[in-house]
Structure formats: C-alpha cells, structure tokens
Amino acid sequence: MNDLNGKTAIITGSASGVGAATALRFAARGAKVLINYSKSRQEAEATVAACQDAGGEAMLCAADVADDAACRAMVQQAVDDWGRLDYLVNSAGTTRRCAHDDLEGASADDFHAIYDVNVVGVFQMVRAAAPHLSASGNGMVVNVSACGGFDGKGSSIAYAASKGALNTMTLSLARALAPDVRVNAVAPNLIDGRWVRAMMGEDAGAAHIAATAEKHPLSRVNSPDDVAAAVLWLATVATTMTGEIIRLDAGHHLT
Amino acid sequence: MDIAGKAAIVTGSSSVTGIGAECAKALASRGCNVLINYVTNEAGAEETAALCGAEGVETLTFRADVSQDADCRAMVAAALDKWGRLDVLVNNAATTRPIPQADLEALDADEFMRIYSVNVVGNFQMTRAAATALRATGDAAVVNISSIGAFLGNGSSMAYAASKGALNTMTISMARVLAPEVRVNAICPGGLLGNWTEKIMTPEGYQRRVQEAETDFPLHKAVWPVDVAGTALWLITEATTLSGEAIRMDVGQHLK
C-alpha cells in the first residue's frame, strides 16, 4: 500500500521502540521518514535501513529535542531535502526510575531533566515544524504520551507528571494550530519493548511484562507496533479528530 | 485482526450513505461478510447489501427492531446459520426526535423510554444475543455508535443525549465483562453531517450546521459517516489493546 507516497514524516526518538515501529509503518506505506536519535546511533541506522527495505525513503538526524537549535535544524534538514512536512510524531522521551514512595530519591534535577525532553522538547519540535505542517494543508502531530499522565503511575512521579503536562499541552497546541494542523496524543501503559528491559534487566523485565499482561482485562500488553498502529490511524484516518488523547491500556482502566 | 472471511452484524445499516451502511461497506472492503439490518427501509438494506456484495463478500439483509429481544436473538441466529461464526458487532441502530432542549414541557417519560429502549436496551440486547458467539472466536470486537451528546448533553433532545451518556457507561461495563475475548468500544461523533443529521433537523437548521462546520468548528469541517466508519474499522482490525474507550470525534469542538 503506497497511499502515503509523497508524504513526509519526522519521528523523534525513532531509533527503537514506538518511534521505530511508527517509522516503519509510515515507510511501508510509501512515506519519507526522518529517523531521529540522541544517543543510539547504531539502532537508528538499523531503523533507516529497515525503512528503506520497507520501500520508503529515510534520512538520519542526530538531535536532542531539549535543544531548540537542534529541533530547528532537524526540521530544516527535512524540509531542505523534501520540500514539505506532513507529519510530526513526538516519540522522543526520557525517564529516571524512582520508586514513587521514595520521595527523597527524587530531586528537582530529575524533574527538570525529564520535563526538558518530554514537554519542552515536544513544544520546541512543534514550534519548529508548525509553519511547514500548516503549509502542507493537512498537517498532523501525534505526541507519544503515557497512561501515567492520567493515573500518576509509571517509572517515577516526575515521569508521570511530565506526561500529564504533555496531555494538557496537546489540547493547547490543538487549539492553537487548528484548522490546518491536527494535534493528538496516544497514551499507552506498559509497552513490551526495550525501555522496560533496560530499566529492570532482561529477566525481571520479561517477568514484569508477563505479570502485567495477566492483570490486564485483554490479557496482553502493548507492543511498539500496537502504538504505531494508533499513530498511523490518527495520521491518516482520524481526520476529524484533534485535541484527543487516545488511551491504549489493554483495558487496565476497567479493573 | 484480519477480518477477511469473517462475519459481522451492523445494526441500522439500511441508509446507504449513513454510518451503519458506511461501516458495512468498510468491513466488506476488507473481505468481511456482513449482515445488513433494517426496520422499515428494506430497499435501502438491499442496496447497501449490493454495494457490500460488490466487494466480493456474502451479505444477508435482516429485518429486526433491536428494542425487541426476540428480534435481536433471531438476527444473531440468522448470521450464525449462514456463516457459522460472528466476529464483529457494530451497534449503530438508534433513534431520536428533535425536541428543543429548553422546552422541558415538550419532553415526557414516553419519549425518554422510547429512545432508551432502542439506544441503550436495544444495544444491550444485541450484545447479549451475540456475546456467546463473539467470545467463541477468541478475538472479536463490538463498536457502539454513540454521540458527543453523551459528554456535552447537547443534540436533538435531552432524552437522546442522556441515552448516549448511558450507552458510554454501558460500553465500559460491557468491555469489562466481555474481556479478554471481546473488545468493546464506542465512537462519539460531534458535528456530524449526512442523512441522519438532515433527517432530524429543519432544512434551515441543517444549512446553518453546514455553514457552522466551515467557520465555527476548529477543524473547519464536519464529521461525515465515512469518517466514523474509518475509525470503526480501525477499532475492529487494529486497536487490539483498546477496550472500554469512548473515542470522541468532534472536529475539535471540545477545544472551543
């Protein structure tokens, strides 16, 4: 299916996980994608290759979204080469793990470091991309948020708070950029991907995923591709939706 | 979920350009056999079935009033007789009548009950009748067509809005009890244009709505039945980690 031929997408934080899965789905439908990473160069290069194998055009861009100049340079790189920008997927995110009841374990520095990427980084990317998304006539932003923004759960209190802020900013940006650009968010809970294994260790991560799946009404957890599917739906099908936050939690809110 | 060769029931799908018919056509386009349900519009049901059949799937038209439990059970039995399975249920059948919300005296208990019996009880009866078959597939989906009125209390009448609020709540309850085999979600269109809206509005009101869509709605456009069908298809085929959700589709009106 090449229905996105000629369309272009920037996906921040797309070396692996949700970002990479999203890039692959865009590429498989013929879109040109920019693969962004801050540290994981090898994985990002592999994602570029995978997108090309899937039939799309892909470029690589190292950038930390917390750095405004880097955000503007990333958008410029894409627009210089492609001449247009249709989609921005803000998938870059960070966390610092800290048990919620260990209040003394969380510092203002943790809060700031997380906020800088998860919220300010998204703002800076949207600001840099906005004129080009508007010009495309059918621009769209998807922010990859988290259920922690609703329920305050997740890897740390600071992380959950940042996602709450991101959800709220999604509303503000949707209002500010209508009617030319739609802005929505996806809010998954646990994703069976690299993050959880890196944070908890391979075995403990796998055990946590299995135990969590058992607790979910749908008896499963999200894969990165489940989240990517929702991003593509928002981009290509949900053309009458803006300012929405789509929860992907395998029914956990029903328990 | 790949729906090719599977079976779906779409209630209230006899208006060729309405949400139900668009959902049926979308399912058929992916190879899913569909039962087209109608109450009075047999010709429209046949036409919708023909359009679905053109996609190469099998169709069945079935007259049933979802407010009648025996009708619901007979409709499910007919689908099972023909296809031996049921994977998808789209509960689209609904009713309303325009009654200005400020005119409290114009609304009465009978109207509340009439609307409730279709929009909520009918939905319950359909899902109940289908539950065993849906569960048996191990991976099934129910989509309830609700309305933005569920959140905002606006729309054609207060009784209608209340019925959609009840439907959203019931979507949550149903999702809980039918998990993990069956996902149950709702779509809540707002700013809908098309045959349904035209039918329940005065011609002048409808024209105003058309203009309002282009100027006042944040996305400067309206929602059309085909938009709802696109998201219904996504919920059925791809949203495998969603259940108990009410997806608002309102061209950004909640941002105003």
Image (spheres, rainbow, N blue to C red):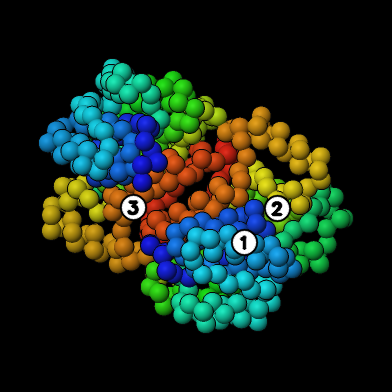
Give me the disc on residue A235. Answer: none
Q: Tell me where residue B214 appears, x and y as whole percent.
A: 65, 32
**Residues beneath discs 1 and 2 located on the same chain:** yes
Q: Is residue A212 visible?
A: yes
Residue B86 is left or right of residue A218, and the answer is right
Give me the disc on residue B48. Answer: 1
Q: Are marks 1 and 2 in contact (CB under 8 Å)?
A: no
Circle 2: element type: helix
Distance between mark 3 and mark 2 Cα atoms: 33 Å
Circle 3: element type: helix
Q: Tell me where residue A187 appears, x and y as whole percent.
A: 39, 46
Residue A73 is left or right of residue B40, and the answer is left
Between marks 1 and 3 in the image, the one whose residue lies nearer the viewer: 1
Q: Nearer the viewer, residue B130 or B8?
A: B8
Amino acid type assigned to the residue bearing label 1 in the image: Thr
Distance between mark 1 and mark 2 Cα atoms: 16 Å
Q: Which residue is drawn at 62% across and 61% down?
A: B48
* Badge count: 3
Around disc 3, counting alpha carbons within 10 Å, would you say few (fewer than 14), some (14 to 19), or many (20 or more)?
A: many
User: What chain is tagged by disc 3?
Assistant: A
Q: Name the residue under label 3.
A: A226
Q: Tell me where residue A134 appears, x and y as whole percent.
A: 47, 24
Q: Name the residue under label 2.
A: B196
- Above or below, B222 relative to A190: above
**Residues beneath discs 1 and 3 located on the same chain:** no
Around disc 1, counting alpha carbons within 10 Å, would you say few (fewer than 14), some (14 to 19), or many (20 or more)?
A: many
